[in-house]
Amino acid sequence: MKINGTLISYFFICKTKLWLHANRINLEDNSEDVRIGKILHEINEEKSKKSEISIDNIKIDKLTRDYLVEIKKSDSDPEAVKWQVLLYLYKLKQKGVERKGKIEFIEKNRQDKKVHYIELDEVNEKELLDILKRIETIINQDTPPQAKFENKCKKCAYYEYCFI
């Protein structure tokens, strides 16, 4: 399976969600937060004159001369977004395109700023390759990892599957 931005993001958010989504148990169509995120994505796409770029199995929000730009609704999972952007930078690098990463949060709640910059250096690339292997291991398990309840689970599309 080719790992995309959603899967690497779920690796940091929840391993159970990662396994379920990767194994095509998709409950996100019922999530209000997912719907809001998709609408914001569509609005930003129109503003940026349909600048989204699809490469292999990833979709990049915007690619400028200097930056790969990822736009997110909120800063609730900055670590997940960071690695999602690093995956995209890595995929671009494999195609011979080198850029820096720029993450723009529309709503900031936890971070002190709305824009974050990131680079794919040797350390990040090595860690990314390790994360990709760990994701493959989780995805290929026969059953999902045991769900562990956290406050963020209450807003998850998989909440009922995991806890009810």
Image: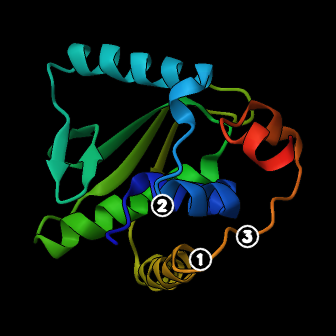
Q: Residue visible at 74% across and 44% down?
A: 161
Report if the CB atoms under discs 3 and 1 are less than 8 Å apart: yes
Mark 3 or mark 1: which comes first in sequence?
1
Task: Report the disc number at residue 145.
Answer: 3
> At label 3, which amino acid type do we have?
Pro
Q: For residue 11, what is the image quadrant? A: bottom right
The 10 Å Cα crowd at callout 2, few under 14, some 14 to 19, many 20 or more, is: many
- Which colour scheme appears in the figure? rainbow
How far from the left and from the top, in percent, is residue 78? 62, 47
The 10 Å Cα crowd at callout 3, few under 14, some 14 to 19, many 20 or more, is: some
The residue at which mark 1 appears reads as 138
> At label 1, which amino acid type do we have?
Ile
Secondary structure beneath dot 3 equals loop
The 10 Å Cα crowd at callout 1, few under 14, some 14 to 19, many 20 or more, is: some
Question: Gap between marks 1 and 2, in whole Å?
Answer: 9 Å
Mark 1 or mark 2: which comes first in sequence?
2
Does the rendering let one see residue 118?
Answer: no
Viewport quadrant of the C terminus: top right
Mark 2 or mark 3: which comes first in sequence?
2
How far from the left and from the top, in percent, is residue 106? 52, 22
The residue at which mark 2 appears reads as 22
Does the rendering let one see residue 86?
Answer: yes
Report if the CB atoms under discs 1 and 2 are less than 8 Å apart: yes
